[in-house]
Image (cartoon, helix red, strand yellow):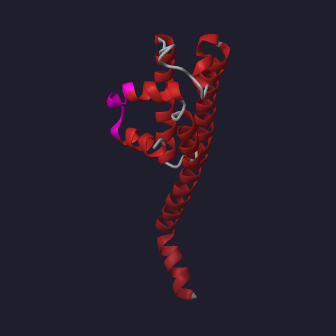
């Protein structure tokens, strides 16, 4: 016990510095964790906002009424330019959701898979997807194609 007391007396400044560094690292890690949680919440709100804007546009504009329809005669009424442009935005949104889900953040991959399977199997989205998929991320194309067999 005397040896410990002597050591502390001799090395008190080094001990104090070491404790300061350890507690500094602990508080930094805590701050980073809080910041990460806050950023994830902010990202989720932003993604959710964009999701709501996009899908509300689908319901707000009557010219997009056919997009979610399972029964569409594309020979009698081909895909319009407005539908195609809107769907390109939807595809980008799906791609972002897929990227986020791949990183294990915010969006579960099961939800993205289910949404892709449902949406991309509809006649108009499927038709537009086939026309634009060559310009998309090859891994995302592979993912979509695996869901819509």
- Front one among 67 and 100: 67
Compared to residue 27, the image places residue 95 above or below, namely above
Residue 32 position within the rendered picture, expressed as x and y whole percent measured from the top left:
55, 47
Residue at x-position 47% and y-position 74%: 10
Quarter that holds the C terminus:
top left
Query: Is 130 on the left or on the right of 69, as rendered?
Result: left
Query: Is 126 on the left or on the right of 35, as rendered?
Result: left
Compared to residue 119, the image places residue 23 above or below, namely below
- Front one among 23 and 101: 101
Q: Please report the bounds of the magenta region as a residue range.
A: 131-138
Residue 20 position within the rendered picture, expressed as x and y whole percent measured from the top left:
53, 59
Quick check: is 61 in the magenta stretch?
A: no
Quarter that holds the N terminus:
bottom right
Residue at x-position 61% and y-position 34%: 42
- Front one among 137 and 41: 137
Quick check: is 137 in the magenta stretch?
A: yes
Compared to residue 62, the image places residue 92 above or below, namely below
């Amino acid at each position: 016990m005397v040896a410990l007391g002597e050591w502390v007396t001799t090395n008190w400044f080094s001990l104090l510095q070491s404790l300061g560094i350890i507690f500094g690292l602990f508080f930094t890690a805590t701050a980073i964790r809080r910041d990460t949680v806050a950023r994830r919440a902010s990202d989720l709100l932003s993604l959710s906002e964009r999701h709501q804007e996009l899908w509300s546009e689908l319901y707000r504009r009557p010219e997009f009424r056919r997009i979610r329809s399972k029964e569409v005669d594309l020979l009698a009424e081909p895909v319009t330019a407005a539908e195609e442009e809107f769907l390109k935005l939807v595809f980008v949104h799906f791609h972002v959701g897929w990227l986020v889900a791949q990183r294990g953040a915010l969006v579960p991959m099961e939800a993205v898979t289910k949404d892709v399977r449902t949406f991309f199997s509809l006649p108009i989205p499927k038709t537009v997807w086939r026309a634009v998929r060559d310009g998309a991320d090859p891994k995302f194309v592979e993912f979509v194609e695996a869901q819509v067999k």
